[in-house]
Image (cartoon, rainbow, N blue to C red):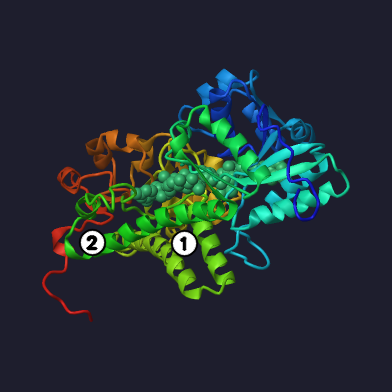
Amino acid sequence: MSSDGLSNGDHTGVVRRITCVGAGYVGGPTCAMIANKCPHIAVTVVDMNTAKIEEWNSDKLPIFEPGLEEIVKKCRGTNLFFSSDIPKSIREADLIFISVNTPTKMYGKGKGMAPDLKYVESVARSIAEHAGGPKIVVEKSTVPVKAAESILSILRDAQRTNNTLAFQVLSNPEFLAEGTAMKDLANPDRVLIGGEDSEEGKKAVAALVEVYSSWVPRERIITTNTWSSELSKLVANAFLAQRISSINSVSAICEATGADVSEVAHAVGFDSRIGNKFLNASVGFGGSCFQKDVLSLVYLCESLHLNKVAEYWHGVIEINNWQRRRFADQIIAELFNTVAGKKIAVFGFAFKKNTGDTRESSAIHVCKHLLEEEANIAIYDPKVEEKQMRMELGLTTSDDKVDKLVSVFSDPYEAAKDAHAIVVLTEWDEFKTYDYSRIYESMVHPAALFDGRLLFKRKEMESIGFRFFGIGTAPNHLTKVGFAAPS
Ligand SMILES: NC(=O)C1=CN([C@@H]2O[C@H](COP(=O)(O)OP(=O)(O)OC[C@H]3O[C@@H](n4cnc5c(N)ncnc54)[C@H](O)[C@@H]3O)[C@@H](O)[C@H]2O)C=CC1
Ligand SMILES: O=C(O)[C@H]1O[C@H](OP(=O)(O)OP(=O)(O)OC[C@H]2O[C@@H](n3ccc(=O)[nH]c3=O)[C@H](O)[C@@H]2O)[C@H](O)[C@@H](O)[C@@H]1O
């Protein structure tokens, strides 16, 4: 019993039915993996977006992840179900994952900084209304520290009028990366579970540990208190984003000096204390989470009056925005200070390779900047649909002047034909396999290639004839030499 006299969760400790609320990039793949690895558990994924549920039940899944379709097809209808009946699925579950979106708030207090928790709260209210019995509720969504307390307050309130209810709230943040989600889920570096430090809390943690133990070695399952778990997720993303901003800041030094950012990253990353991962300089990180989660951490620090700490982490975002802008400005400068009316081929629109996800993609920022300068941009991406690109660029009306500046191609060779430049914004492997001599011949000369993803070797591209500009590398004639004092 808790201090308020309500039951803390009378759970049997064995999970047989899981419901996941939120059938998105996390809920879908995570539940597919659990169903695949735990044939003894029935897993139902629900969503308020009925069209999305229909897609999960169709041949064309709503998201692309290598390896996902195979597992969904294998388990769907056996122990993996996609449903729009949220009340029923909540009622029947022993354990409920909350896996809904927590985007940056775009209104009111904390606008542009704090995560919007209205979806998490609405799921907590649905659980309170439809539970009908004891449940383990698991925060899978990324939330600020102490979010579990708010969820618990809503759930515990429902217990006052229904004494058959009992709840435990756990934090179990997800660390998968898009494009490698199935690999990450099958073989995670760690699984993190935070829970209440009480007998019932420990029982609930043990029940979730048991689920993951079906395929994750026990030593990789970390258990902590709830707040450490919630904070660790934000901090993990902040550290990863910080590494990218660090190497991107170094890329600017390389371009000015003749050092090569790949060589520097290699040399620095060779130190086992630093490590070689996540040191690829780029046009800036994108994706739905890095910016949102770093901003959430900054907002948390500000709320705690830790202004220096907030400032420190905000620098990660500032460098990222600066890098995107710097790259776009360089394109304009190198195309003789005007891109108006010039065709520019954009290779890649997704925020990284092997995904069709475009949320916060750096491509959006670079393209918007080029459109402001009235460039004609010709986009090719192997996975992103035209509708999605236009939505992200804010182009909604077909007679809009800007809309006419954008064309979308299904063939990269056609996208590059008659272009003044190619701009590489996503690191799709297929971009490295094209016949660049043929592409070069079809372009307006002098033809430029701007490599925002370090896919190409300067010498090879220059020998074809391209004027080559790569993040973190500079042609020798542009570098500053000697012991110049700061001006
Ligand atoms: N996308 C990623 O790679 C990762 C995301 N995360 C975190 O996981 C959470 C989910 O992210 P995504 O899956 O990318 O979001 P998403 O936007 O792809 O999916 C969220 C789904 O929740 C549904 N939803 C929202 N409110 C609902 C409600 N009240 N009832 C039923 N369904 C509701 C939406 O319709 C949507 O389909 C976020 O907190 C995110 O920060 C964590 C790790 C990786
Ligand atoms: O919370 C989340 O949503 C997830 O965020 C990231 O995963 P994701 O955004 O899917 O993809 P990443 O591989 O981390 O790439 C993020 C962005 O950084 C860029 N990046 C990555 C690595 C690098 O060295 N350089 C670089 O510019 C990528 O191109 C991409 O735009 C984290 O890697 C996951 O652990 C985390 O679970």
Q: Amino acid at mark 2?
A: Glu
Q: Secondary structure at mark 2?
A: helix
Q: Is residue 182 or residue 137 the one in the foreground?
A: 137
- Residue in the image at 36% along x and 39% along y: 428
> Residue extending furthest right?
161
Crowd rating for badge 1 (residues with CA inside 10 Å; few <14, some 14–19, many 20+) = few
Where on the image, by quarter, is ligand 1? top right
Residue 401, image x, y percentages: 54, 55
Q: Could you say which disc has been placed on residue 255 in the image?
A: 2
> Residue extending furthest left?
482
- Residue in the image at 19% along x and 48% along y: 458
Figure quadrant of residue 479: bottom left
Figure quadrant of residue 460: top left
| Mark toward the viewer: 1 or 2 | 2
Crowd rating for badge 2 (residues with CA inside 10 Å; few <14, some 14–19, many 20+) = many
The C terminus: image quadrant? bottom left
Q: Amino acid at mark 1?
A: Glu
Q: Could you say which disc has been placed on residue 49 in the image?
A: none
Q: Secondary structure at mark 1?
A: helix
**Left or right of 132 in this view: 290:** left
Q: Is residue 163 or residue 175 the one in the foreground?
A: 163
Say whether residue 27 is visible: yes
Q: Is residue 152 or residue 333 the one in the foreground?
A: 152
Vertical position of residue 199 compared to residue 207: above or below: below
Residue 240, image x, y percentages: 40, 53
Q: Earlier in the sequence, mark 1 or mark 2?
A: 2
**Left or right of 168 in this view: 286:** left
Residue 158, image x, y percentages: 83, 48
- Residue in the image at 66% along x and 52% along y: 148
Marks 1 and 2 sit apart, C-alpha to C-alpha, by 25 Å
Cβ atoms at labels 1 and 2 below 8 Å apart: no
Q: Which residue is mark 1?
A: 372
